[in-house]
Every structure is written in structure tokens, then in C-alpha cells.
């Protein structure tokens, strides 16, 4: 495979409005896989777009109006109950966080109960989850790092951090190819691992091996985007058990209406 061919594929994929803000390194990773399997550049471009849709674009059925969201957030004082309401409203624009909104108070209160002081948080494949910050039982000086593949979303989140007074930063990166290794007290992997394994079947195991977190909050969807359960709780319970096998983890399991979660103490 020539570098010129891969460059052409990357450029063609990122010309589409749904894919132009995705980390180029991820487009190249998937594109290289598809070029090796397909008969033509055209077929590889189409297959790369399909894969990117499955792991990202499918969770954003429409364009998110980040400008309007920031304007609403700036108008509301952080101490006002309207601020939480606006965060709640914006999170409805992303399927992953929208599913959690029905039980968001319980989700974070229950899964993170009893943790020692958390000073650093790493939210991987974060989507719009950083807007759940007002619900997180964290100290006000916590350092929060949000990581995702969408550059425009991360720009919005960085502005949200500034408005909300959060000591936060963002990173655009392909966490399959470049998993973060910096130490963190708490790493959030919310409905992330199944998406990664659509790109690389070993991605989940490789990622958790690389991470340097004291606690991991790992969750899985309990139903599809279309609302069907299809035995997903049982399947993902087995998936997690296989992931945890042989690791020196202490685990708590939680089940919510649309989400299965595991709090892991890694002993790192």
C-alpha cells in the first residue's frame, strides 16, 4: 500500500461533513485496514466511512449546535439550577449521554460512592459526558482531561470547562493507536470498549493494559441504539469477565435501565 493512496483516502473521507472533524490518525488507521481488504480506493473510502459511522457518527444523528449551547451556558450562572438544566438539555444531542439522562443522578452517586479523594480524571471517548460534571461527586479542584476523536466537540468542551470553572483540558487522539499512559485517579470508559473493538478486536485488552488508572469506571450499553436489549447484558457481562480474567482487579457491578457498569480498583 502506498502512502499516496492512503493520503488520498484520508482526504476523501475527511471531505465529508460527518467526518472532517475526526482525528486524522484514526481515519488513517481504519483506511489502511480497508485498503488492504478492498479491491479499489472507492470501495475502501466507502468502507472507512461506514466504520467511522458505526463508532462515532451514529451517536450524533444531527449536527450539534455548539454555538447555541455555549451561548445558553454563558447566560446561566454556574450556581444556578438552570446551568444543570442546560447541561442536561445539551447532552440529549449525543445518543450515549442521552440514554443515561434518565438516571444520571443515581448513576454517578452509586458507581462512585465511597471512593477516596479523586484529584485527576481521564474521560476517554468522552462524547458530551464532560457536561455531566455538575453531577459528579468530585472536589472542585479536580483536574479533568477529556479525550475524543472529534475536534469540534472538544473545542466545545474546552469552552464549557472555562465557563464552568473546571480545571480541565481536552485531547484529540486515537486511543487505540496512542492510548494515554499518564497516571489518573479515575478513568472513565463509558460504553467505549465495544466501539473500539469494531476497529480492532484486541483494542479493549490492549487499552486497559496501557492505562495507568487507580480506578476505572467501565460501562456497556444494555440495549441497542434502536432500543432492543437482545441479551446485551449477558453478552457484555461475559465480555467484561473475560477482560478482567487474570488481572488483579477488585470489581463492583452495577446495572441500570440502559447501562451495565463496573467499578474497577486496579491496585496500580
Image (tube, rainbow, N blue to C red):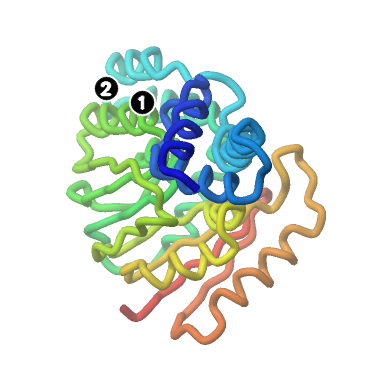
Residue that label 1 marks: 83
Residue at the spot 58% in from the left edge and 69% down from the top edge: 253
Closer-to-camera residue (1/214): 1
Q: Identify whether 109 is placed above or below 90.
A: below
- Measured in 3D between alpha carbons, the distance from the residue under mark 1 to the one under mark 2, in whole angstroms, is 6 Å
Direction from residue 72 to residue 77 in the image, left or right: left
Closer-to-camera residue (182/140): 182
Marks 1 and 2: CB-CB under 8 Å?
A: yes
Residue at the spot 39% in from the left edge and 44% down from the top edge: 25
Q: Please state, as top left, top right, bottom left or bottom right, where the C terminus lies in the image.
A: bottom left
Q: Which of marks 1 and 2 is nearer the N terminus?
A: 2
Residue at the spot 21% in from the left edge and 30% down from the top edge: 162
Q: Position of residue 145 (x, y in %)?
A: 28, 48
Direction from residue 125 to residue 213 in the image, left or right: left
Q: Identify whether 230 is placed above or below 241.
A: above
Q: Quadrant of residue 51?
A: top right
Residue that label 2 marks: 77
Q: Where is residue 81 in the image (x, y as percent from the top left)?
A: 37, 27
Q: Identify whether 125 is placed above or below 95.
A: below
Could one spot residue 132 in this view of the protein? no
Q: Position of residue 62 (x, y in %)?
A: 58, 20
Q: Where is residue 201 in the image (x, y as percent from the top left)?
A: 60, 63
Q: In which quarter of the image is residue 241?
A: bottom right
Amino acid at each position: 500500500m502506498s502512502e499516496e493512496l492512503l493520503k488520498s483516502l484520508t482526504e476523501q473521507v475527511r471531505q465529508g461533513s460527518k467526518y472532517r472533524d475526526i482525528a486524522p490518525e484514526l481515519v488513517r488507521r481504519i483506511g489502511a485496514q480497508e485498503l488492504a481488504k478492498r479491491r479499489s480506493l472507492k470501495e475502501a473510502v466507502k468502507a472507512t466511512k461506514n466504520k467511522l459511522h458505526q463508532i462515532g457518527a451514529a451517536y450524533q444523528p444531527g449536527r450539534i449546535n455548539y454555538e447555541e449551547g455555549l451561548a445558553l451556558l454563558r447566560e446561566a450562572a454556574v450556581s444556578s439550577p438552570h446551568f444543570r438544566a442546560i447541561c442536561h438539555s445539551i447532552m440529549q444531542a449525543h445518543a450515549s449521554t442521552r440514554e443515561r439522562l434518565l438516571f444520571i443522578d443515581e448513576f454517578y452517586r452509586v458507581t462512585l460512592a465511597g471512593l477516596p479523594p479523586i484529584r485527576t480524571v481521564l474521560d476517554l471517548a468522552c462524547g458530551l459526558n464532560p457536561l455531566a460534571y455538575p453531577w459528579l461527586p468530585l472536589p472542585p479542584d479536580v483536574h479533568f482531561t477529556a479525550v475524543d476523536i472529534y475536534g469540534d466537540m472538544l473545542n466545545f468542551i474546552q469552552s464549557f470547562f472555562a465557563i464552568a470553572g473546571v480545571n480541565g483540558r481536552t485531547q484529540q487522539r486515537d486511543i487505540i493507536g496512542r492510548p494515554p499512559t499518564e497516571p489518573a485517579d479515575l478513568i472513565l470508559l463509558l460504553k467505549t470498549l465495544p466501539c473500539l473493538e469494531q476497529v480492532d478486536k484486541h483494542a479493549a485488552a490492549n487499552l486497559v493494559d496501557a492505562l495507568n488508572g487507580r480506578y476505572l469506571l467501565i460501562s456497556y450499553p444494555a440495549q441497542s441504539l434502536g432500543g432492543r436489549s437482545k441479551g446485551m447484558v449477558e453478552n457484555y457481562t461475559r465480555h467484561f469477565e473475560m477482560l478482567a480474567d487474570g488481572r488483579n482487579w477488585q470489581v463492583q457491578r452495577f446495572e441500570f435501565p440502559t447501562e451495565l457498569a463496573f467499578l474497577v480498583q486496579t491496585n496500580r
